[in-house]
Image: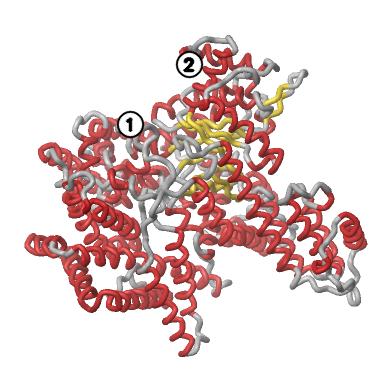
């Protein structure tokens, strides 16, 4: 296939290397197509590509009809091969782009001293040094910042694990092309290997034949720890310490743990009945197994580097004493004993490996023969570190021991903190049954909110248990309470850090938090001593999702902070209360403008409440990968937060295709985390020196009115148009997305067909596939228009807001991104599938009018000639990708039309559905987005 240039030619050699890689990979794909389907297949693919490209360059109705005729006339076999050819094409181009990002990073590093890469760790430290920020302030920043990235199993990763592994091998081999010392024969061998990999990709099924189980999803999450994060995270810390030592050499720096990963996978039971207490326990066990396995590998590797002999150097007496103690308590197999008594480090490492192995086994009764805590492991590592430095082997200690120490500090024996999440109604139902059986109240659910708060507060003060072992409870109630028992047992087995947060979906009142605390009290997770002292090891964290919930959030937190039984638990969490904000459901509920505005208002108002009560807040931002679910680059999502709201730390969800795009390759993972670190330090510094925009209050008043009008416009269509939901289901591949087998969780929270019960992921996924991207921009134009009203002075105010107010400029630029990716010409083809064409035309015209209005206003506000003129690399990438995505979209419409016309249980249904799913994967790869 013919190459596509992803970035505009900027005249640098690095750019030419990207073009080389794209040309190289697409040429190989062309050879594979000929090999598999003959020259006829390649010619057919090229014909469709050229027609699509010509249409994009200059639209003509006659050519458009010819193009659709060619697409519709394909035989089933040709259609299948064309779909796969375009889909794999995008996979290869995406690999080339990712490698190019790594290459550019290396280009900057090669020119160290000449230029520093933007958004790098060295960039922010050098900037602070240039601004005369004292080391004491930097130390204070490092002590207070915190970023936790939380993997979730939200079903938006359409690519199979085996396909991702092929991608990784291709990426590694293509990067080797940069090696100038390769011989001609080595280049030939490399090319032969890549042909084999692309052929393997062609002959590998992209589609899963079954839904993944929860434990499959756990394994997929652990893949990123195993392949990249275990090594990359310590490298981020090492780079930060290197830069601090370079610019502030008079300070002995040891950066505290501020950046870590967590997970929901195996703990998120909201709407997923497959996540049970037993699954959560198995998840934690798998976490520990991987952590200990990685440590065992690291210790084995250290054996090759710590061959220091006492014939030459003198080690510390404490090292020798620890070896004697190990010999006394640990019995090694004869073949495991290190025979050379003059190499004490290797002897010590043999015993340390045995203690790591024994840490995984309950059969080892002697506690001194195993590590029972990561702190014990760290003691031995620090002991080795001190001994190495005593005989001037500090270089070895810095390179090998300090990295392993950092890994243990980061991952412990639990690998990653696991969050548990459940819907508030599940707790209410369990509480109702428990209280009724104990004759405390007949119908807890029917109580008013104030009555619930009073009752639950009293129960927290009452030392007596609520449940009786002599009473029978429903299966659902037992499962709820078993989760708490599992958490209690897990904290004892895996360490307290393994689970510390319990997230409550659809929090709508203070009672939702108190219920979790009362249920936790039942198993000892909350304990009140006779003197009134409270001990708590599990914190309820509210999740505010809808617009109404965001409005209620400050009042709810005010209420719980005023309840002594609750407020007294917060010191056990370093005086920090975690609060989660949902970007997906708030967007689905109120539209993108209103969601962004209300989230900002909620952030600031909740922060004020917490400050009055001397509580620090850790905000957990539930962002998806797509623009309609709060998606944006990691560093921008950090910088988008009001600086005063980051004091207690930040958590952000990382899910679906975001995981593979950011963390599948070490170079990309490092760059993403480096940018996040730079943004976090910059934001923390800004919070200490915040410059108040004198016009911000006026801007907020304007923004409030814009949001109100946008919400009305949005909800008029989404909620108040009786034909809209049917239009959505029929004009997008929504029903078929559920067949994609990309997650263990159902697409709906309940078994109903109500719009309110549809999850935000398939909502966004459907609009993305059909090229509307409606959740990411709809109603923005009407909102802006309500202030502009054609008045030049008002337009000038909007322009000033864009230039001087970061919130507004970020919002406008995200709208540009969405509008740039949307394509209403192709979206109109999807609308033709609707059974009610009168309603479909009315709704489509309304969407199209809003698209045109929004585009026009954004161009007026920004002063640009075209959408995304301010981000020309992305603008060019979208323009150049579209001709390759378009054929897949037209094929998808054709296939959906045929599929939906088939009678139930038709023999053709299975094959047509499979073709539809292949187009879904291809479009997702082309747009680099699912849901």
User: In the image, residue 749 lies at what x, y percent?
Assistant: 39, 34
Residue name at image x 46 percent, y 84 percent: 189
For mark 2, give the secondary structure: helix
In the rendered view, would you say 280 is above or below 478? Answer: below
Residue 33 horizontal/vertical position (percent): 29, 74
- Compared with residue 535, is residue 7 higher up or lower down, i.e. above or below? below
Q: Quadrant of residue 54?
A: bottom left
The percent position of residue 657, horizontal first and vertical second, equals: 42, 54
Name the residue at the left extreme: 62
| The quarter of the displayed image where residue 834 is located | top left
Q: Which mark is residue 75?
A: none
Instruction: Quickly name the residue at label 1.
Output: 752
Query: Is residue 62 rendered to the left or right of residue 189?
Result: left
In this rendered view, identify the residue nearer to me: 883 or 550: 883
Question: Observer-nearest residue: 763 or 279?
Answer: 279
Q: Is residue 527 left or right of residue 5?
A: right
What residue did someone put label 2 on?
Answer: 445
Circle 1 residues within 10 Å: few <14, some 14–19, many ≥20: few
Which comes before the other along the chain, label 1 or label 2?
A: 2
């Amino acid at each position: 296939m013919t190459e596509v240039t992803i970035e505009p030619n900027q005249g640098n050699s690095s750019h030419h290397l990207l073009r080389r890689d794209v040309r190289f990979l697409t040429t190989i794909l062309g050879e594979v197509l000929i090999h598999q389907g003959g020259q006829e297949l390649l010619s057919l693919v090229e014909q469709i590509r050229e027609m699509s490209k010509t249409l994009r360059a200059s639209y003509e109705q006659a050519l458009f009809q010819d193009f659709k005729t060619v697409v519709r006339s394909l035989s089933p076999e040709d259609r299948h091969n064309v779909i796969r050819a375009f889909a794999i094409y995008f996979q290869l181009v995406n690999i080339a782009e990712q490698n190019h990002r790594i290459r550019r990073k290396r280009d900057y590093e090669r020119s160290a001293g000449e230029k520093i890469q933007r958004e790098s760790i060295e960039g922010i430290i050098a900037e602070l040094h240039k601004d005369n920020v004292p080391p004491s302030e930097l130390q204070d920043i490092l002590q207070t910042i915190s970023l936790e990235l939380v993997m979730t199993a939200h079903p938006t990763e359409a690519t199979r694990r085996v396909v991702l592994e092929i991608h990784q091998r291709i990426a590694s081999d293509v990067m080797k092309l940069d090696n100038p010392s390769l011989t001609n024969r080595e280049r030939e061998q490399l090319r032969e290997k890549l042909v084999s990999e692309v052929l393997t990709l062609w002959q590998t099924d992209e589609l899963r034949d079954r839904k993944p189980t929860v434990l499959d999803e756990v394994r997929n999450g652990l893949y990123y720890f195993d392949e990249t994060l275990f090594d990359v995270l310590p490298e981020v810390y090492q780079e930060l310490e290197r830069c601090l030592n370079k610019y502030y050499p008079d300070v002995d720096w040891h950066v505290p743990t501020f950046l870590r990963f967590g997970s929901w996978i195996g703990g998120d039971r909201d709407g997923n009945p497959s996540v049970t207490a037993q699954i959560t326990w198995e998840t934690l066990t798998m976490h520990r197994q991987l952590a200990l396995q990685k440590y065992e590998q690291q210790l084995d590797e250290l054996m090759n580097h710590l061959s220091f002999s006492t014939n030459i150097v003198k080690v510390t007496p404490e090292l020798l004493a620890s070896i004697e103690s190990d010999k006394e308590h640990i019995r090694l197999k004869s073949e495991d004993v290190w025979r050379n008594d003059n190499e004490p480090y290797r002897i010590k490492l043999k015993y340390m490996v045995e203690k790591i192995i024994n840490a995984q086994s309950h059969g080892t009764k002697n506690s001194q023969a195993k590590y029972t805590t990561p702190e014990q492991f760290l003691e031995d590592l620090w002991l080795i570190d001190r001994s190495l430095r005593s005989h001037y082997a500090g270089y070895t200690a810095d390179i090998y021991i300090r990295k392993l120490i950092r890994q243990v500090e980061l991952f412990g024996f639990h690998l990653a903190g696991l969050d548990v999440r459940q819907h508030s109604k599940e707790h209410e139902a369990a509480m109702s049954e428990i209280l009724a059986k104990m004759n405390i109240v007949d119908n807890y659910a029917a109580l008013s909110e104030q009555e619930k708060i009073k009752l639950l507060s009293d129960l927290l003060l009452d030392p007596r248990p609520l449940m009786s072992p002599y009473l029978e409870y429903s299966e659902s109630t037992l499962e709820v309470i078993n989760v708490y028992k599992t958490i209690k047992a897990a904290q004892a087995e895996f360490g307290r850090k393994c689970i510390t947060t319990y997230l409550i979906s659809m929090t709508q009142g203070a009672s939702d938090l108190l219920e979790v605390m009362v249920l936790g009290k039942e198993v000892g997770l909350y304990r009140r001593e006779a003197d009134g002292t409270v001990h708590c090891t599990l914190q309820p964290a509210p999740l505010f999702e809808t617009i109404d919930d965001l409005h209620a959030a400050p009042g709810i937190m005010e209420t719980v902070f005023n309840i002594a039984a609750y407020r007294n638990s917060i010191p056990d969490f370093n005086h920090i209360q975690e609060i989660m904000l949902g970007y997906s459901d708030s967007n689905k509920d109120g539209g993108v403008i209103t969601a962004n505005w209300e989230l900002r208002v909620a952030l600031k108002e909740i922060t004020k409440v917490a400050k009055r009560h001397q509580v620090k807040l850790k905000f957990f931002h539930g962002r998806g990968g797509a623009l309609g679910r709060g998606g944006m680059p990691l560093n921008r999502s950090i910088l988008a937060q009001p600086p005063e709201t980051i004091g207690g730390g930040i958590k952000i969800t990382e899910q679906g295709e975001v995981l593979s795009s950011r963390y599948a390759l070490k170079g990309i993972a490092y760059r993403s985390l480096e940018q996040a670190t730079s943004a976090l330090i910059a934001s923390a510094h800004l919070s200490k020196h915040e410059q108040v925009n004198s016009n911000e209050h006026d801007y907020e008043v304007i923004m409030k009115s814009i949001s109100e009008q946008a919400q009305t416009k949005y909800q008029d269509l989404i909620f108040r148009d009786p034909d809209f939901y049917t239009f959505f289901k029929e004009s997008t591949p929504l029903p078929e997305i559920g067949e994609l087998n990309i997650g263990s969780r159902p697409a709906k929270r309940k078994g109903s067909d109500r719009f309110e019960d549809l999850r935000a992921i398939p909502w966004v996924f459907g609009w993305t596939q059909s090229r509307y991207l409606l959740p990411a921009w709809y109603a923005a134009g009407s909102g802006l228009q309500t202030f502009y009203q054609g008045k030049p002075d008002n337009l000038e105010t909007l322009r000033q807001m864009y230039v001087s107010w970061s919130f507004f400029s970020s919002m406008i630029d995200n709208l540009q991104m969405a509008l740039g990716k949307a394509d209403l010409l192709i979206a109109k083809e999807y609308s033709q599938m609707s059974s009610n064409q009168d309603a479909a035309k009315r709704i489509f015209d309304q969407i199209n009018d809003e698209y045109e209005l929004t585009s026009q206003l954004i161009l007026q506000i920004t002063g640009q000639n075209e959408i995304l003129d301010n981000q020309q690399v992305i603008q060019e990438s979208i323009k150049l990708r579209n001709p390759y995505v378009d054929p897949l979209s037209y094929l998808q419409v054709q296939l959906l039309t045929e599929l939906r016309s088939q009678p139930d249980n038709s023999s053709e249904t299975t094959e047509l559905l499979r073709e539809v799913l292949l187009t879904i994967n291809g479009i997702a790869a082309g747009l680099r987005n699912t849901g």
